[in-house]
Image (cartoon, grey):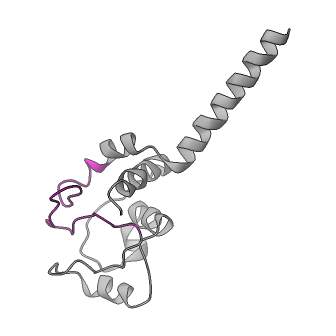
């Protein structure tokens, strides 16, 4: 009886830990999700802006802040509001770009799966100092 209780406690602890990891996102899974972004964005050592700006240090960054990149007027206006790319704001943007920047240049259908968005953000955090 005692060993069954121990097994039950271990299983419950494992499930809670897995649930917490999913709530925060999985950077390894996020790397796979980022493949959808790679055509336009770069991240990591030597990252350069492409069609879209590079995403190094995106967490905590103000919009339209990569020097030399031609941002839309809506993205520049968003920068003037004090908006910052927090994980919550990135989540909303990546889910539905036009809900945050209605007339921005980014043409992306969005990531509807909440876990994909969490994983992507966890991956991008790896490139934030």
Could you tell whether 6 is left or right of 48 in the image? Answer: right
Q: Position of residue 95 (x, y in %)?
A: 43, 60
Q: Read off the magenta span.
A: 34-59
Say above or below: 36 vs 83.
above
Asked where in the image residue 129 lies, by quadrant, the reply is: bottom left
Check the image and name the residue furthest to the right. Answer: 1
Check the image and name the residue furthest to the front. Answer: 129
Q: Position of residue 118 (x, y in %)?
A: 47, 52
So how many labels did they put on this image?
Answer: 0
Q: Residue at (37%, 40%) from the top-left corner? A: 28
Could you tell whether 124 is left or right of 73 in the image? Answer: right
Seen from the viewer's position, the closer of residues 45 and 38 is: 45
Seen from the viewer's position, the closer of residues 61 and 107 is: 61
Is residue 108 inside the magenta stretch?
no
Q: Position of residue 85 (x, y in %)?
A: 41, 72
Q: Residue at (29%, 77%) from the top-left corner? A: 104
Is residue 48 inside the magenta stretch?
yes
Q: Position of residue 10 (x, y in %)?
A: 70, 23
Quadrant position of the N terminus in the picture: top right
Q: Residue at (27%, 80%) from the top-left corner? A: 65
Say above or below: 114 vs 12.
below
Q: Residue at (58%, 35%) from the top-left corner? A: 18
Would you say the magenta stretch is mainly helix, strand or loop? loop
């Amino acid at each position: 009886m005692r060993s069954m209780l121990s097994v039950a406690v271990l299983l419950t602890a494992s499930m809670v830990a897995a649930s917490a990891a999913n709530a925060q996102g999985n950077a390894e899974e996020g790397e796979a999700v980022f493949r959808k972004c790679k055509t336009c964005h770069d991240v990591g050592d030597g990252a350069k802006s492409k069609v879209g700006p590079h995403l190094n240090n995106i967490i905590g960054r103000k919009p339209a802040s990569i020097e030399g990149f031609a941002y839309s007027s809506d993205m520049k206006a968003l920068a003037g509001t004090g908006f910052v790319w927090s994980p919550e704001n990135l989540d909303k943007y990546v889910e539905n770009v036009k809900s945050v920047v209605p007339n921005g240049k980014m043409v992306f259908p969005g990531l509807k799966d909440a876990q994909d968005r969490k994983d992507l953000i966890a991956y991008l955090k790896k490139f934030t100092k």
